[in-house]
Every structure is written in structure tokens, then in C-alpha cells.
Amino acid sequence: MSAVVHRAEVLPSGPAPADPVARVGVLVSLNFPDMDEEIAALARRFTRVALATLADLGAAIELLDTSTPLPDPEAIGACDGLLLLGGGDIDAACFGPALSEVPNGYGVDRRADLDALHVLGIAEGADLPVLGICRGSQLINVHRGGTVVADLEDYVLHRGGPGEPLFLDETVLVEEGTRLHAVLDADRVVVRSGHHQAVDRVGRGLVVAARALDGVVEAIEDPARWVLGVQWHPEDDDGSAADRQRLLGAFVAACAARRNHQQIEERTL
């Protein structure tokens, strides 16, 4: 029997913030094809850390699980921001010709991809701050018409090899003048990576915000609005807690600023 991740295993254990600074929609497929217990354990841990960090930052959470069709994708419009978490590969048909086989490919669920892209379109249409992690960063790029590298042949900087742990420490070079550089306040950071795909052709309105030492794109952003995607996993608690707080803290602050702006507009109508 395939491994299963349940909502109760990832939601914060404490009470929701009584007076949240923002309401964040968190989109993830808790379960996807090819999931084994090792991947399920990572999904539980990473999702739990991400949600707990949001709660600690004072945000309320609306969990949108695309494991099954979303009952109301439009619900993201009532949120103040969208966080896209990691998961399986995006179906290549979403950004180019369908591929019969992808080396090291796993977890493809075209229906979940289309649901996620639909929610992302609503969020961008409402000018919500958007943060994408790993698959989430790739979804942002695909939504903007970009493409994804199907499989990184030279993977040694990005994930463990056969018989090794999937996740490793990776050095990433952050582009000066980007939002990401301002958030992390660093030219170079060590991050937790475990990916076999990455952003290829960058989508409309996006720029590269960070690269790996081999030139692979590790972050993208929109200079004109708060849209940012990172290929690595700041929610891996084996990595830097300070960088996780900086990145998610900046995102929640952007969500809170939008919430405050909306409330002011409503009061003046």
C-alpha cells in the first residue's frame, strides 16, 4: 500500500493566531503518485515546518491540498498571499511537448498541476504576494510561459546520488539588486536542495534571482511585484533557521501589507 500523508499530520498543533497579521493560502499536494514512505516522511516534515513557521509569524493558514480536486479554487481570493510548496514533477505537457519518459521523474499528476496553475492565476490576478518553493517556483515559471529542465544530467550539486540521502547542502549565488538579495542580505547562501529539475527558459516578467555554482537557475522573481520562487527548501529544518525566518518573514510581511492596504481601501469606500 502506498504511503499517505494526512492533514492532521502537518497542521500546527497550537491554536491559530487570535488576531492574524495575514491569511495565507498554502497550496500543496500532500499525496501524489509514486510516493513512498521516505518521500511521505519528507513531505510531512517540510509541510509541518512551513506551516508552523507561518503560524509563529502570526499568519492564519488556509491549506489547499491538490491531492484531490479543490472544492473552491476561488477561495484563494479571500487570502492575503499564496505559498506554493514542493512535491512531484510538473507534467511536461504543461510547458511543452509531452515526454514519454523523464529520467528520475516522479509524482506527475496533470490534474493537480492544472488546479495549481488555476489557483496561481487567480492569486496573480488579485495581486497577492506569491512565494514558490521547489515545484512551486517551477509552477510560477510555467504559469508565466517559461519552461523546466526535465532532468539535470549533472546533478551532483543539487541532490544526492544513488544510495545517498536525497537532500544535501548546496551553495547558491544570489544576484545583487534583487528582492531575494535584500531579503537574505547575502551574496552567497548555503541551502538545502534535493531536485532533479529546475527552471530553464524564464517566463514573462521574471528575472533570475539566484544561480547554483554550475549556472543552474535556483531562484526567480518578478521585479515589479512580490512574486518570488526558490528552487531549494527553506522549510527543511536541517538547513538555516535564520534564512527560513528571513524568507518566510518577508513573505508574511508582504501579505500583511497587502491586508492592511485592502482594509484601508474598504474603510474609505
Image: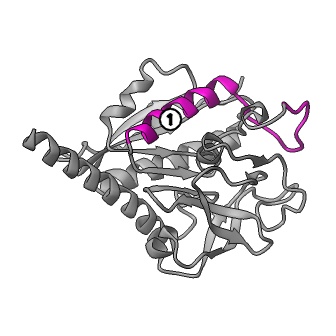
61 in magenta: no
Q: Is residue 15 visible?
A: yes
The residue nearer to you, when weighing 7 against 72, is 72
Give percent across and percent down for residue 19: 16, 47
**Circle 1 is placed at which residue position?**
121
The residue nearer to you, when weighing 203 against 13, is 203
The residue nearer to you, when weighing 98 against 42, is 98
- Compared across the picture, whether 217 is left or right of 61 comes to right
Q: Quadrant of residue 167?
A: bottom right
Q: If the image is split into quadrants, where does the N terminus sit? A: top right
Which amino acid does the dot numbered 1 rest on?
Gly
Name the residue at 80% across, 72% down: 214
What colouring method underlies this structural image? one colour
Name the residue at 31% across, 59% down: 253
- Compared across the picture, whether 112 is left or right of 182 comes to right
Give percent across and percent down for residue 114: 61, 27
Magenta stretch: give its range.
Answer: 98-126
